[in-house]
Image (spheres, rainbow, N blue to C red):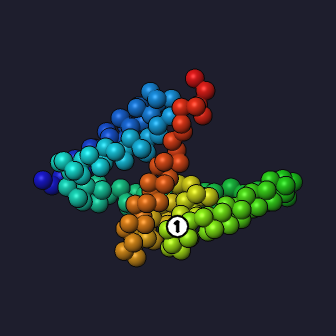
């Protein structure tokens, strides 16, 4: 079965909406990305064609959004505010450095150098970093790593029930 652009986009948007509603119902204990990933997986196993994401043109929109986000973040830095909050900058840089040491020390022996390099931006930078690394990995043909870091981002949005006050 093949879908047209409109149907593919509509199906993905509805699935994302349902995922958001379910995430709200669980008080964000289970994130939107987990629900959406499960829906996509079930769809691939049942009725979705393998190219539904490409047919919907979501990757093109994501690339444009990434550029807009990067430009917006880069242009919104106030150097005077950064100078005043230099302690925050130093703590952030030390935290990123510490995360890098931890990731490379723990992940490299278990999963290899490629996995540690691919996972570091995802763990430190969030959605935009994950999207950029994901695009690079897909372009290089490392689809297994690309899927793994997206799964890592999805699972990082999950919180156990004991971590969320009721």
| Residue 72 as seen in the image, left or right of residue 82 | left
| Residue linked to disc 1 | 110
Image-quadrant location for residue 74: bottom right
| Residue 122 as seen in the image, left or right of residue 51 | right
Q: Residue 79: x and y, percent? A: 79, 60
Image-quadrant location for residue 2: bottom left
Q: Residue at x 18, y 47 (%)?
A: 46
| Residue 138 as seen in the image, left or right of residue 78 | left
Q: Is residue 67 visible?
A: no
Residue found farthest to the top? 166
Q: Residue 52: x and y, percent? A: 25, 55
Up/down of 22 relative to 117, above or below: above
Residue found farthest to the left? 1
Q: Residue at x 36, y 74 (%)?
A: 141
Residue count near mark 1 (Cα–Cα under 10 Å), binned few <14, some 14–19, many ≥20: few
Q: Is residue 21 visible?
A: yes
Helix, strand or loop at mark 1: helix
- Count of residue discs: 1
């Amino acid at each position: 079965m093949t879908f047209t652009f409109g149907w593919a986009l509509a199906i993905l948007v509805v699935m994302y909406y349902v995922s958001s509603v379910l995430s709200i119902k669980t008080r964000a204990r289970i994130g939107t990305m987990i629900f959406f990933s499960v829906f996509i997986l079930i769809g691939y196993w049942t009725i979705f064609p393998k190219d539904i994401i490409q047919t919907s043109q979501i990757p093109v929109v994501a690339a444009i959004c990434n550029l807009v986000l990067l430009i917006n973040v880069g242009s919104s830095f106030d150097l005077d505010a950064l100078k005043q909050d230099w302690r925050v900058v130093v703590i952030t840089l030390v935290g990123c450095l510490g995360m890098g040491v931890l990731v490379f020390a723990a992940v490299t022996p278990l999963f290899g150098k490629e996995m540690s390099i691919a996972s570091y931006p995802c763990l430190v930078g969030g959605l935009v970093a994950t999207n950029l690394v994901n695009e690079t990995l897909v372009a290089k043909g490392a689809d297994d790593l690309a899927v793994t870091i997206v799964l890592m981002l999805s699972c990082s949005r999950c919180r156990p029930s004991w971590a969320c006050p009721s």
